[in-house]
Image (tube, helix red, strand yellow):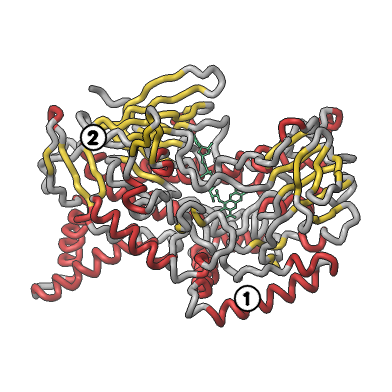
Amino acid sequence: MSIDTDVLIIGAGPSGLGMAVQLVRNFGTRNFEIIEKTSDVGGTWFANSYPGCGCDVPSHFYSYSFAPNPYWSRKFALQPEIHRYFESVVSQYDIRPHVRFHSAVVLAEYDPETASWKVVIEDQRTKHQIHKRCRILVSAIGVLSTPKRCDIPGAENFKGRLFHSAQWDHGFDYKDKEVICVGEGSPQTQLFKWAIDAYLLLLGNGCSATQFVPVMSAGENQVKKITQFSRQAHWLSYRPNPEYSGAFQFLMCWVPGAQRLYRTYLFLTQEKDFAGFHMKNGQNMRNDWTATTTEYIQKNSPTKYRDFLVPNTIIGCKRRVMDTDYLACLHRKNVELIYDDPIDHITESGIMTKSGRKIDADAIVLANGFETQKPFSPIEIRGQNGQNIADHVSQYQQVEGKFRLISFQWLEFAGGSPEAYFGTCLSGFPNFFILMGPNTLSGHLSVLYTTECQVNFIIRVIRPILDGLNRSMLPSLFVTEYPESVVVTPVAERKDVAVTDHKAKQLVWATGCTSWFIDPSTGRNTIMFPDWQFKFHLRSIFIPWTDFLYKKSPKGSLREVTVVPRYPLGVATASIMLLGALLRLSSAESFKLSSTLTILQQQVSGFLPWTR
Ligand SMILES: Cc1cc2nc3c(=O)[nH]c(=O)nc-3n(C[C@H](O)[C@H](O)[C@H](O)COP(=O)(O)OP(=O)(O)OC[C@H]3O[C@@H](n4cnc5c(N)ncnc54)[C@H](O)[C@@H]3O)c2cc1C
């Protein structure tokens, strides 16, 4: 049995790219492959090209710690600039030759006989399938990459354009396309044109909608009319977005440590917000937020919408939305917000509301979010007993009139809701890791920070296996046997889920607002990490090794191998020797102290994403 690639990564978004770069940085090896279903890198930042699309985390923190960018043009960069950033990282580390574009992973099966994954990849253009075998499989398919479908009756009858904000239809107005290539040719500049004279219907008022309604409703190319339907208001906070001056960029680029310091400042100012999510202890902080935000909404919104726009949910229960001039644009004549007369059905020319109002439109834009509670669907990922992760949610299958249990992992551990140890590992799935998995996101910080922590965690866990695949010519001091597989124990996974659930119940996310964090079938928070983000980082460094089972599988029969992670031991030994020589310490006590300090220093400062 031969392995095609040591590590196969599904998805070339920020998480998958981060994983690839860290493989290069840590192992120097390039025996990895990324499978990407679209035609470019960047994930979210390639797919989402609606007008005004941008980041709600300051860009100096929404970037990799290993690839800081002193030239961010503004505090919260817009999509074209963010996409260019990921492209530059890909070029810097020469990742593109390792990406197989237009290809989707449709099936992955673990083969316990060979401790490897058999992966079926489908070309998105020809539907031709190929098979690959890898030792380690990493899912980096994101949580927000499958747009929700339109479930309003009659959608199939609509004669105009109907599309999701994450699949923006740039070809809507062919006549105006002649001016699209002017300027940078970015998706954003294209959009200003097609919107002219169009009547638009918009379903949803989440983050995306609040970004594109202001852009499309103003300026010389403004849309004729946008009618927006909304069910639940968001807490919209004031967010200025200043441009960085040349002097600031110079400072970031040339003054040693300035960028790290700014990054740390951004981390600390955002991290403190977590205190406000705690039901008991965060009450005062939430009272302040509520007062300030209510005042802001009331001051800036039209009187007719005020009652609706000040939410009746507890602040922090949903991710807070930054106001990108959305409230101001509600004053415009070409924008109408409908919140008290929901859509009954879609007609050939527009929609009919419950009260019988008919509204015609050229296009209907869905800003109704993503499938967040069906991770991995439609991919089939089968673990060591043949169980499929995607089936875990649906638990039972009807066979010849009888219901048969077809899987057990998520049913057994979390009542059928998505879960994973550290949001990354599942006990029935050896050599398999999930980036941006269940319970990893924060309500206040950058996903890139989270995903970097996970990547560094995975690198530490798989190091003994990759070392075995890429052995050094020098005899190893510490390891005589290399493992071929690693899996988290069921006990550790169960404990982790219990701790996560216990903590999540004490937070404001559990107060009952409609939010994509909660699995409606179980009421479980499956999305958010219910603790401080610095703790997420520490967990990725100080790994309880007894939670993992490393195994060697010669000729099909599995036997356990005790693995002493070589890296920390090597670092510890080298540190002891180096410090001993430098400080000329002779007493055993001092020796112990200095080595401990050095190990800590290596372990902590070497991997601090907010300072490196
Ligand atoms: C509009 C929008 C704005 C956002 N703004 C912020 C923000 O301000 N701050 C923040 O922290 N987060 C934000 N996010 C969250 C954002 O998704 C993450 O920050 C980040 O993009 C996650 O990266 P990822 O690589 O894990 O997933 P993604 O970016 O979603 O990338 C996943 C990749 O996997 C590919 N893929 C999926 N399935 C398959 C398959 N079967 N086979 C092959 N390839 C596959 C996809 O095509 C995609 O390229 C935003 C999300 C959206 C949609």
Q: Secondary structure at mark 1?
A: helix
- Whether residue 397 appears in this view of the structure is yes
Spatial CA span between label 1 and label 2: 53 Å
Query: Residue 206: which quarter of the image?
Result: bottom right
Displayed-image quarter of ligand 1:
top right
Mark 2 sits near ligand 1, with its Cβ under 8 Å away: no
Query: Where's residue 166, x and y in %?
Result: 64, 41
> In screen coordinates, is 57 left or right of 332?
left
- Whether residue 65 appears in this view of the structure is no
Name the residue that disc number 2 marks.
Answer: 469
Query: Where's residue 363, x and y in %?
Result: 79, 38
Query: Where's residue 443, x and y in %?
Result: 53, 62
Please identify the quadrant where the N terminus is shown: top left
Query: Where's residue 282, x and y in %?
Result: 51, 78
Residue shown at 19% from the left, 54% from the top: 570
Name the residue furthest bottom: 284
Q: Secondary structure at mark 2?
A: helix
Alpha-carbon neighbours of circle 2 within 10 Å: few (<14), some, or many (≥20)?
A: some
Name the residue furthest front: 401
> In screen coordinates, is 312 left or right of 598?
right
Q: Amino acid at mark 2?
A: Leu
* Contact check, label 1 and label 2, Cβ < 8 Å: no
Name the residue that disc number 1 marks.
Answer: 289
> In screen coordinates, is 158 left or right of 505?
right
Q: Amino acid at mark 1?
A: Trp
Query: In this rendering, is residue 379 above or below 445?
Result: above
Please identify the quadrant where the C terminus is shown: bottom left
Query: Residue 361: which quarter of the image?
Result: top right
> Which numbered disc flags the more N-terminal residue, 1 or 2?
1
> In screen coordinates, is 140 left or right of 56?
left
Query: Residue 83: which quarter of the image?
Result: top right
